[in-house]
């Protein structure tokens, strides 16, 4: 791939099966795209946090189960 060809490529948004040249979209639309990207990143981060909390809760339940065995 030559440098001229790679520089001339503009970012493409694929949304609902259609492709859009991002550079040709209005600024307001570009801002919406950025906001969606941020929202997606935040969702992934919080999903990871929930997974970690769930693992911690399960670990605590296991510890409690072990401690309560002596009372059975």
Image (cartoon, grey):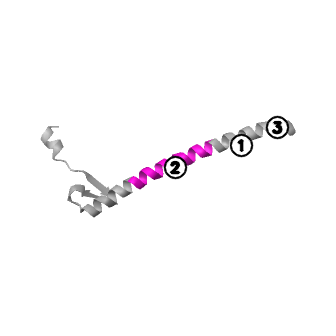
Q: Alpha-carbon distance for marks 2 and 1?
A: 21 Å
The residue drawn where x is 29% and y is 62% is: 29
Mark nearer the N terminus (2 vs 1): 2
The part of the chain drawn in magenta is: 38-55
All told, the count of numbered labels is 3
Mark nearer the N terminus (3 vs 1): 1
Circle number at residue 61: 1
Q: Give the left or right position of residue 3, taking residue 53 as reference.
A: left
Q: Find disc 2 in the rendering and name its residue.
A: 47
Mark nearer the N terminus (2 vs 3): 2
Circle number at residue 34: none
Q: Find disc 3 in the rendering and name its residue.
A: 69
Q: Give the left or right position of residue 25, taking residue 60 as reference.
A: left
Q: Is 7 situated above or below 16?
A: above
Q: Is residue 10 magenta?
A: no
Q: Position of residue 19 (x, y in %)?
A: 27, 57
The quadrant where residue 72 appears = top right
């Amino acid at each position: 791939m030559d440098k001229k060809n790679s520089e001339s490529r503009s970012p493409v948004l694929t949304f609902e099966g259609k492709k859009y040249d991002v550079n040709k979209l209005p600024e307001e639309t570009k801002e919406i795209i950025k906001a969606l990207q941020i929202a997606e990143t935040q969702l992934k981060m919080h999903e990871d946090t929930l997974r970690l909390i769930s693992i911690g809760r399960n670990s605590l339940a296991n510890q409690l189960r072990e401690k309560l065995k002596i009372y059975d």
